[in-house]
Amino acid sequence: MTTTTNPTTTPTSRSAGSDTAFPIRSMLLAGVAATAAASVAIAAVAAAGHAAGISLDMAGEPIPVAGFATLTAMLSLVGLVLAALLGRFARRPRRTFVRTTVALTVLSLVPDVIADAASTTKVLLMVTHLVAAAIVIPAVARRLSA
């Protein structure tokens, strides 16, 4: 008599450092789209603030509206690199990404508070950081595994 056994496999959760493919393309596409949207939104916020009479001068030098968009894009792309690394190596990529980027957003407000600028300019700078974070963080976090 012969007995045949069919081995069953159960899906395993992805652990840190596993070879499971991380869907980086989806995250990068969403992140680049969010980066573009955030850059445009920040430029619009800065332009609207300037049109409303808020100075864009810091330490006596004007900040060009395009500079807001450029820095937003550069720093958002750094965030995408962070997300890619966390997506590949972190045990809980979404949670780690959100916690890290929220902490970095809070830290990004510190230079605004101590900047050599008018108080209205400081507030505008802080608002731009928060708007960018509100656009980019959720868009990228949604693409990371919980």
Image (tube, rainbow, N blue to C red):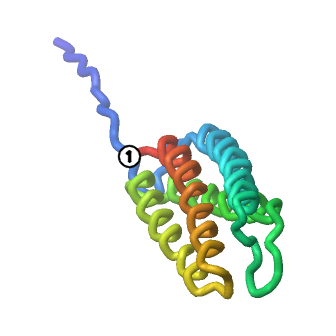
Q: Secondary structure at mark 1?
A: loop
Q: Residue furthest top?
A: 1
Q: Residue at x 57, y 55 (%)?
A: 131
Q: Quadrant of the N terminus?
A: top left
| Image location (x, y in percent) of residue 67 | 80, 65
* Rendered location of residue 113, percent (x, y): 55, 81
The front one of 1 and 132 is: 132
Compare residues 2 and 135 and report the one nearer the observer. 135
Please count the marks in the image: 1
User: Alpha-carbon neighbours of circle 1 within 10 Å: few (<14), some, or many (≥20)?
Assistant: few
Would you say 60 lies left or right of 133 here?
A: right
**Circle 1 residue:** 146
Identify whether 25 is placed above or below 130: above
Q: Amino acid at mark 1?
A: Ala
Q: Residue at x 27, y 21 (%)?
A: 6
Above/below status of 45 relative to 31: below
Q: Is residue 30 left or right of residue 3?
A: right
Residue at the image point whose x is 62% and y is 61% from the top:
128
Residue at position x 63%, y 69% in the image: 125
Can you give x and y, in whole percent of width and height, for residue 136 in the image?
Answer: 58, 51
Say which quarter of the image contains residue 42: bottom right
**Quarter of the image where one finds residue 49:** bottom right
Q: Is residue 118 above or below residue 143?
A: below
Q: Nearer the viewer, residue 110 or 104?
A: 110
Which residue lies most toward the front here?
A: 53
Whether residue 42 sits left or right of residue 7 in the image: it is: right
Give coordinates of residue 65: x percent, y percent: 80, 61
